[in-house]
Amino acid sequence: MMLSMTEQRLRRAKSIAAAGSYARARRKEVLPKHVDVTLSEALVLGLLKLGVTRYVGIFGHGSTDVGEVLRLYQEAGLVRVFPVRHETEAALAAAALNWAKGEPACVFTSIGPGALHALAGSLVAASDGIGVWFLLGDETTEDEGPNMQQIPKQEQGLFMRLFQTLGQAYSLHTPLALSSALRRGHNTVAHPFKAGPFFLLAPMNTQPVVMEGFNLDELPDPVTFELGPCAEDQSYDIAIDALCQAQRVLVKIGGGARGASGPLVEFLDRVSGVCVHTPIATGVVPYGYPGNMTVGGSKGSICGNYAMENADLVLTVGTRFVCQSDSSRTGYPNARKVVSIHPDPGEANHYGETIPLIGDASRVLRQLVHGLDHQRHCPGEVAMAWREDCGTKKGEWEAFKRQRYECPVLFDPMWGREVLTQPFVIHQALEMARKHGAVSFFDAGDVQANGFQIAEDEEPGRTLTETGASYMGFAVSALLATAMSTRPFYAVAFTGDGSFTMNPQILIDGVVHGATGCVLLLDNRRMGAISSLQRAQYGADFATHDHHDVDYVQWAASVKGVLPLFGGYTGDSLAHALKEAFSFQGLSLVHVPVYFGDDPLGGLGAFGRWNVGCWVADTQRLRHETGL
């Protein structure tokens, strides 16, 4: 008796599950080499072979056949599907999962608005170098007339054109091109230094097409890409000569330096240098290390910006020079040489007077140390004093932060009473997260800026700050990753009232899928970061705040399964609420009214330059004077 398509799909899925993996099923030949299979099922099989078992998104008329395959494969225990309430939430959660736990996921959508929501959310993966698969419904290939929700214009491939702008994309217009599509996707999602989103556009009429006798061995195998050191040429000699002549060496650490902690510390000690890290690189060099001057840039620290301002040589490691991170290219006014370690020549050759070293960060740093040893280079008195001077500034920064922690409340006219300050709340919550081994996700805005100034990570991966796109709602959506991971974990989403109201779906989706974490909602009833910028530049804030009262605790209480908590107005009430939240085996929300105003004790301040607003002329003038 001939089996139906549903029976064939389920039998294949169960045979793979029984074998223990796709690879074992093929080796044992319980999964034959040649099969009659639809494009949709072959796609799921190909992603399974590449290690993708987590799917998150929203089904629609543009993805019904894919949905049926996933239903059966989930029934067999091969995949897990997480239906959510917004495609942007899905894109952010998938990025957070790979960022926090190294697990790739696939975001699925229908055609039209849903795909565009996912496109917007994919900016996080693109900006922060995180691999995420996207499977998007698309218009049919036979052009029988406009498909509902396609772009209303008589041209072909318009969605393809859109998605190619933000990342790599491939249209499954021809089913037998699937293996090429998956190979290109794997090369993008698993890229060793420039991972990002990969968009598979699946026309509605090609998804259910049966490929007779399809050769499963055409589906690509997963590959681990490994980088080497810089080629042995004169670049090393030039760099080592520059390092030997320098007296105030600064290392700027970006996200591409994750995994190079040991070589970084060894190099810093060898040259008596100091380091400044970008917000996404907290913990790469332990906070307590004497040469770590924390963050620098337009929202840096006293010590970080002092080091940037006074260094005579900058060595950059795996950073892409975001405007705020290097004060719009004015962050190093006294530097005369830049040694840049990066696998991408375009990124490595960003500044003038650059010595690019193209290769893996760890291996290049070890080569530099070896070269310095060969030259018998010893840091001089000025270099030794350089680290001491920066250390003094770090002491000032510690005192500056402590002063704010010791002033937990300030009077806020909008609230009409004393409320807690953001530095105090964030510091207390980060301490609680550290003690519990929790991951801390930060949303954009005031909370984010204060957060990366306060974070004191001793290892990478404890604080994940989405500064690449500064996507409002990233942190709360990221909590879904705690349920999606094959290794469940606890996380805290540090968010403001603006970011939370852009992506509140987590209150429902988090409970539905079993997220374990806390939404810490710091409420100043405004876009605090922009209000502050407006006041600093023009003396008044405009259209960035309102006085509308929202009962966030009641909002959370309206969703069965969420633990609603009020953080109160004192350190004791906050501590009690956080203790309850961390003890709860599920999703909680802690609402904390916080101060906004001009009192310097209410925030961490800014110590750098930025090429925006009325600061543009001075910033650009300095950049061109510096000529770096």
Image: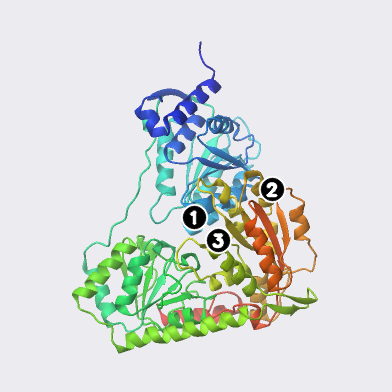
Residue found at the very far top of the displayed protein: 1
Residue that carries the numbered disc 2 in the rendered image = 508
Give the SS element for disc 1. Answer: helix
Mark 3 burial class by Cα count in 10 Å: few <14, some 14-19, many 20+: few
Residue 612: image x %, image y %? 58, 74
- Residue at left offset 45%, top offset 26%: 15
Viewer-side residue, 12 vs 625 = 12
Mark 1 burial class by Cα count in 10 Å: few <14, some 14-19, many 20+: many
Numbered disc in front, either 3 or 2 = 3
- Report how far apart the C-alphas of labels 2 and 1 lie in the structure: 23 Å
Numbered disc in front, either 3 or 1 = 3
Earlier in the chain: of badge 3 and badge 2, it is: 3
Mark 3–mark 1 CB contact (< 8 Å)? no
Residue 172: image x %, image y %? 49, 36
| Amino acid residing under circle 3 | His
| Amino acid residing under circle 2 | Ile
Give the SS element for disc 3. Answer: helix
Left or right relative to 240: residue 106: right
- Report how far apart the C-alphas of labels 3 and 1 lie in the structure: 20 Å
Residue 398: image x %, image y %? 52, 81
Image quarter of the C terminus: bottom left
- Residue at left offset 52%, top offset 42%: 54
| Amino acid residing under circle 1 | Trp
Give the SS element for disc 2. Answer: helix
Residue 593 image-quadrant placement: bottom right
Residue that carries the numbered disc 1 in the rendered image = 99
- Report how far apart the C-alphas of labels 3 and 2 lie in the structure: 25 Å
Residue that carries the numbered disc 3 in the rendered image = 436
